[in-house]
């Protein structure tokens, strides 16, 4: 995957403290997967997560299923 051509986004809740992940939502429509990477290492590894799994993860975060920091 050519990650340098993807439009990477961070959560609007990100405080830019260096512990953020980025995701490329536009990629999911064409492939059914959501690329996710560590914002501190933009040229590092990229995980690809199926769209339904990513949506469940985001829903869990919003509902507090994973606790708070």
Image: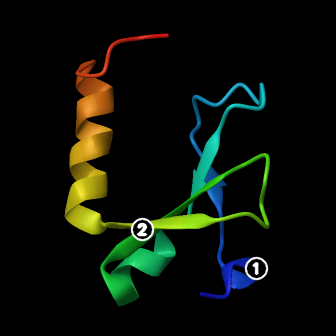
Residue 61 in picture, x, y percent from top left: 32, 29
Q: Residue 11 versus residue 34: which sits nearer the camera? A: 34
Label 2 packing within 10 angstroms: few (<14), some (14-19), many (20+): many
Q: Quadrant of residue 14?
A: top right
Label 1 packing within 10 angstroms: few (<14), some (14-19), many (20+): few
Q: Is 48 on the left or on the right of 65, as rendered?
A: right
Residue 5 in picture, x, y percent from top left: 72, 84
Q: Residue furthest front?
A: 45
Quadrant of the rendering where the N terminus is positioned: bottom right
Q: Is residue 25 above or below residue 63?
A: below
Q: Is residue 5 above or below residue 64?
A: below
Mark sitting earlier along the chain (1/2)? 1
Q: Which residue is mark 2?
A: 34
Residue 19 in picture, x, y percent from top left: 69, 31
Q: Which mark is residue 47?
A: none
Q: Is 54 on the left or on the right of 65, as rendered?
A: right
Q: Residue 61 versus residue 47: which sits nearer the camera? A: 47
Residue at the image point whose x is 57% and y is 28% from the top: 13
Secondary structure of the residue carrying numbered label 1: helix
Q: Is residue 53 above or below residue 16?
A: below
Residue at the image point whose x is 65% and y is 77% from the top: 6
Q: Is 20 on the left or on the right of 40, as rendered?
A: left
Q: Is residue 27 above or below residue 39?
A: below
| Cα–Cα span, label 1 and label 2 | 15 Å
Residue at the image point whose x is 32% and y is 41% from the top: 58
Q: Residue 12 versus residue 63: which sits nearer the camera? A: 63
Q: Which residue is mark 1?
A: 4
Q: Quadrant of residue 48?
A: bottom left
């Amino acid at each position: 995957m050519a990650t340098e051509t993807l439009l990477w986004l961070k959560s609007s809740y990100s405080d830019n403290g260096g512990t953020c992940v980025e995701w490329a939502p536009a990629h999911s429509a064409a492939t059914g997967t959501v690329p996710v990477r560590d914002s501190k290492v933009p040229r590092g590894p990229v995980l690809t997560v199926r769209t339904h799994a990513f949506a469940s993860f985001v829903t869990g975060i919003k509902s507090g299923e994973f606790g708070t920091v």
